[in-house]
Image (tube, rainbow, N blue to C red):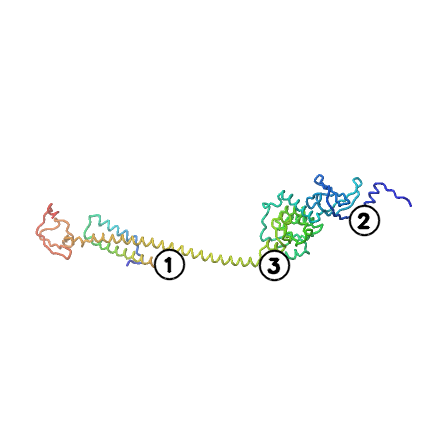
């Protein structure tokens, strides 16, 4: 049998074929991160090791779920490959923190980083339109979270249109799918009023996607207000911190975004009653005010009438003073000759018959003589 | 009692004119009697009119207060 001798190129090619065959293209390795470094903000290099071995790895920064540090436990998925120039490495497709301590560490690092960038600032929080007319719902249609959310929402406010984004909410493809769905929903030409991202509770591993940097950034970058509801009550996920609003469960999300139509109806009816009562009160007040004004007008009118009556009463006394009979009462007399008033001594002659009117009757007299008045006559 | 179409203002002006005439001093006695009688009629009519107006206002106020 002839001895097989390869050229370096052939050896590399054959080895890569063998590796492809051996691992089905993809290998999963879990171990401790070492020599982690980022080059040109684009490439990452690190080793994954245990007590006895280490494996070189290479990848793009875009697949990083969060900041990583040496010493953290990670689980990687990638393609083992012998590079013609640089030797053996695993080209990493995805990397996840693993083990409680590392997950917590990754969470803390990412939280610190995004907090510093202001992604969780209260000032960024937007008010959700209430109630929304259209919702972009990002979840798995097969999940209990979807069923719970839809059940509560249709019972409370069945008027909302749903744009469904069916994604995996856990596992390896989850972060990318979630981030893409959130971005799509927000960048639509005619986007929904809000985007709701939800899933039920689960283990820290199950919920890891919601602490993935890509998902958190997609939520923070959303052009429409966001609500994140993850069915757990303990530590908040970073997605929830980045969202404009958070809900404790999918059902709670449905309760928060829309009112209950029956409660709303009762409230409208109550408002109607209050409005009616207010209108009645207003009219009663107005009637009272008009009555008050009417009383004031009447009082002023009465005052004017009474003053006029007093004036007339005063004039009455004045008129009485001009009564010719009153003057006769004082001893004056009116002298008529042939029915005409005698105003001068020269108007009568001796022998004329005169009628002298006094207060209580008429005296008939005959002229026996006349003369002109002198001073004594005036003051007699 | 004054007539329905009693003109208060005209009656009041006429009464004022009569008083002015009396106050003028140059009073013809026979004319004074007629004017005095007219003044007396005007005073009665004005008094009656004002008294009726007073009663009418009071009645309307009472009705308004009862909400009629």
Q: Give the Cα separation between the discs numbered 2 and 1.
A: 106 Å
Left or right of A218? Residue B5 is left
- Asked whether disc 2 touches disc 1, contact meaning CB atoms under 8 Å apart, the reply is no
Q: What label sits on residue A22 in the rendered view?
A: 2
Instruction: Write down the chain letter for disc 2.
Output: A
Q: Residues within 10 Å of mark 3 (few under 14, many from 20)?
A: few
Q: What residue lies at 18% left-to-right and 52% top-to-bottom?
A: B29
x and y percent of residue B42 in the render? 26, 55
Q: Give the Cα separation between the discs numbered 2 and 3.
A: 54 Å
Dot placed on the residue nearer the N-terminal end, 2 or 3: 2
x and y percent of residue B36 in the render? 22, 54
Q: What residue lies at 86% left-to-right and 42% top-to-bottom?
A: A6
Q: What label sits on residue A155 in the rendered view?
A: 3
Say which of B15 and A330 sits in front: A330
Choose top left, top right, bottom left or bottom right for residue A152.
bottom right
Q: What label sits on residue B65 in the rendered view?
A: 1
Q: Residues within 10 Å of mark 2 (few under 14, many from 20)?
A: few
Element assignment for label 1: helix
Say which of A54 and B52 sits in front: A54
Q: What label sits on residue B35 in the rendered view?
A: none
Q: Give the Cα separation between the discs numbered 3 and 1.
A: 55 Å
x and y percent of residue A322 in the render? 20, 52
Q: Nearer the viewer, mark 2 or mark 1?
A: 2
């Amino acid at each position: 049998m002839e001895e097989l001798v390869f050229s370096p190129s052939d050896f590399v090619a054959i080895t890569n074929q063998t590796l492809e065959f051996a691992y089905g293209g993809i290998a999963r390795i879990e171990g401790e991160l070492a020599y982690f470094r980022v080059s040109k903000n684009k490439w990452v290099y690190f080793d994954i090791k245990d007590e006895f071995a280490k494996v070189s790895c290479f990848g793009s920064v875009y697949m990083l779920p969060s900041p990583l540090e040496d010493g953290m436990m990670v689980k990687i998925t990638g393609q083992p490959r012998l590079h013609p120039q640089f030797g053996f490495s695993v080209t990493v497709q995805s990397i996840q923190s693993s083990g409680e301590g590392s997950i917590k560490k990754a969470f803390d690092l990412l939280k610190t980083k995004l907090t510093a960038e202001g992604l969780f600032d209260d000032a960024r929080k937007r008010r959700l339109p209430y109630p929304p007319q259209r919702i972009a719902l990002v979840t798995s249609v097969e999940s209990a979270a979807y069923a719970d959310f839809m059940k509560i929402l249709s019972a409370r406010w069945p008027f909302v249109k749903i744009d469904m984004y069916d994604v995996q909410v856990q596992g390896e493809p989850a972060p990318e799918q979630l981030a893409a769905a959130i971005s799509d929903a927000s960048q639509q030409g005619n986007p929904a009023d809000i985007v709701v991202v939800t899933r039920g509770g689960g283990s820290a591993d199950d919920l890891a996607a919601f602490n993935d940097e890509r998902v958190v950034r997609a939520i923070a970058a959303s052009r429409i207000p966001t609500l994140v509801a993850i069915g757990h009550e303990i530590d908040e996920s970073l997605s929830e911190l980045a969202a404009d609003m958070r809900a404790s469960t999918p059902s709670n999300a449905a309760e928060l975004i829309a009112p209950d139509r029956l409660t709303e109806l009762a409230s409208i009816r109550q408002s109607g009653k209050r409005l009616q009562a207010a209108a009645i009160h207003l009219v009663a007040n107005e009637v009272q005010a008009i009555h008050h004004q009417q009383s004031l007008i009447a009082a002023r009118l009465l005052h004017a009438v009474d003053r006029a009556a007093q004036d007339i009463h005063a004039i009455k006394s004045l008129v009485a003073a001009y009564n010719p009979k009153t003057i006769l009462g004082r001893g004056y007399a009116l002298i008529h000759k042939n029915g005409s008033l005698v105003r001068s001594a020269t108007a009568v002659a001796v022998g004329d018959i005169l009628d002298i009117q006094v207060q209580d009757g008429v005296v008939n007299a005959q002229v026996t003589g006349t003369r002109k008045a002198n001073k004594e006559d005036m003051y007699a | 009692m004054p007539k329905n179409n009693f003109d208060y203002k005209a009656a009041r002006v006429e009464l004022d004119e009569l008083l002015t005439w009396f106050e003028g001093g140059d009073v013809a006695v026979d004319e004074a009697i007629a004017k005095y009688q007219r003044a007396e009629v005007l005073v009665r009519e004005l008094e009656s009119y004002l008294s009726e107006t007073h009663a009418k206002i009071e009645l309307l106020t009472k009705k308004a207060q009862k909400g009629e």
